[in-house]
Image (cartoon, helix red, strand yellow):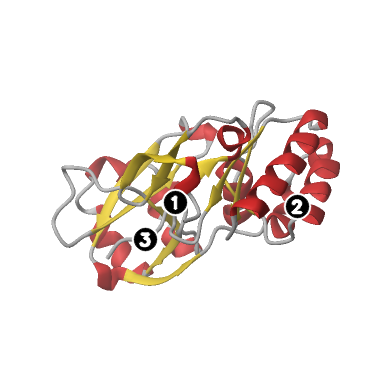
């Protein structure tokens, strides 16, 4: 079982203690011990060589107060209760700083289905303080055609020029290939794309083929 990037994964609270048993040092962090019981998700990550076969690779990004560590877990598939897309930007709006509100409003008007990950998403999902004065706004857009992606990138450049924070984000194709919107804005013939199984370069003309 493998999830697409940024997918949120909710675990069975009854299984969490057993999962943590493989990571004794984490028992000293109450926030981690209580994480799943508090209804908080983990997030899909790429597999690494240390992951056991048949396990699902997940990550748990801790807030800045705990050093912004990203913990890596590999869980049995039957420990998973549900999964979900990252939150809609419109749903996370209330957690955003006041200075971000106008920019977010413009982004939601541009595409009501815009989703967020990163600091804003985790503050929205957990109620914990993830945002700081240097936080970026990390976004995901799902786009099905090249011309729609071009229009989106043009509009994003206008919004970004007036934004008080850096707008980072990925445009995701129907095949699950993700490309940074800033990279797509340039005329390079090849693009770096990301997927659940790794990164690759692809010809711009084939991105939506």
Residue ID at (29%, 50%):
73
| Numbered label tally | 3
Residue 175 vertical placement versus 69 (above, below): below
In this rendering, would 209 be left or right of 147?
left
Secondary structure beneath label 3? loop
In this rendering, would 111 be left or right of 21?
right
Query: How far apart are labels 1 and 2 at the CA level?
Result: 27 Å
Residue 6 picture location, percent across and down? 47, 52
Which mark lies nearer to you, 1 or 2? 1
Residue ID at (83%, 35%):
99
Residue in front for this viewpoint, 87 or 123: 87
Which mark lies nearer to you, 3 or 1? 1
Query: How far apart are labels 3 and 2 at the CA level?
Result: 26 Å
Query: How far apart are labels 3 and 1 at the CA level?
Result: 13 Å
Instruction: Give the mark, 3 or 1, whose residue is nearer the N terminus.
Output: 3
Residue tagged 1: 177
Instruction: Give the mark, 3 or 2, whose residue is nearer the N terminus.
Output: 3
Residue tagged 3: 3
Dots 1, 2 in contact, CB < 8 A: no
Secondary structure beneath label 2? helix
Dots 3, 1 in contact, CB < 8 A: no
Mark sitting on residue 187: none
Residue 96 picture location, percent across and down? 74, 44
Dots 3, 2 in contact, CB < 8 A: no
Residue 88 vertical placement versus 153 (above, below): below
Instruction: Give the mark, 1 or 2, whose residue is nearer the N terminus.
Output: 2
Residue density around tag 3, few if under 14, some if 14–19, many if 20 or more, within 10 Å: some
Residue 75 vertical placement versus 130 (above, below): below
Residue tagged 2: 93
Which mark lies nearer to you, 3 or 2? 3
Residue 71 picture location, percent across and down? 35, 42
């Amino acid at each position: 079982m493998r999830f697409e990037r940024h997918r949120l994964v909710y675990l069975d609270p009854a299984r969490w203690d057993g999962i943590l048993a493989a990571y004794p040092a984490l028992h000293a962090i109450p926030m981690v011990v209580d994480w799943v019981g508090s209804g908080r998700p983990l997030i899909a990550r790429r597999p690494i060589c240390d992951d056991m076969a048949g396990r699902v690779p997940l990550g748990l990004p801790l807030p800045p107060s705990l050093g912004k560590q990203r913990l890596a877990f590999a869980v049995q598939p039957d420990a998973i209760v549900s999964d979900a897309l990252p939150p809609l930007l419109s749903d996370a709006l209330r957690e955003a700083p006041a200075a971000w509100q106008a920019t977010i409003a413009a982004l939601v008007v541009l595409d009501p289905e815009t989703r967020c990950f990163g600091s804003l998403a985790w503050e929205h999902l957990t109620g914990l303080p993830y945002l700081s004065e240097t936080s970026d706004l990390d976004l995901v857009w799902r786009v099905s055609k090249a011309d729609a992606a071009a229009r989106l990138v043009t509009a994003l450049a206008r919004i970004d020029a007036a934004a008080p924070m850096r707008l980072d984000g990925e445009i995701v194709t129907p095949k699950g290939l993700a490309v940074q919107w800033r990279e797509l804005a340039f005329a390079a013939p090849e693009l770096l794309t990301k997927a659940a199984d790794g990164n690759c370069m692809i010809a711009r003309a084939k991105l939506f083929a």
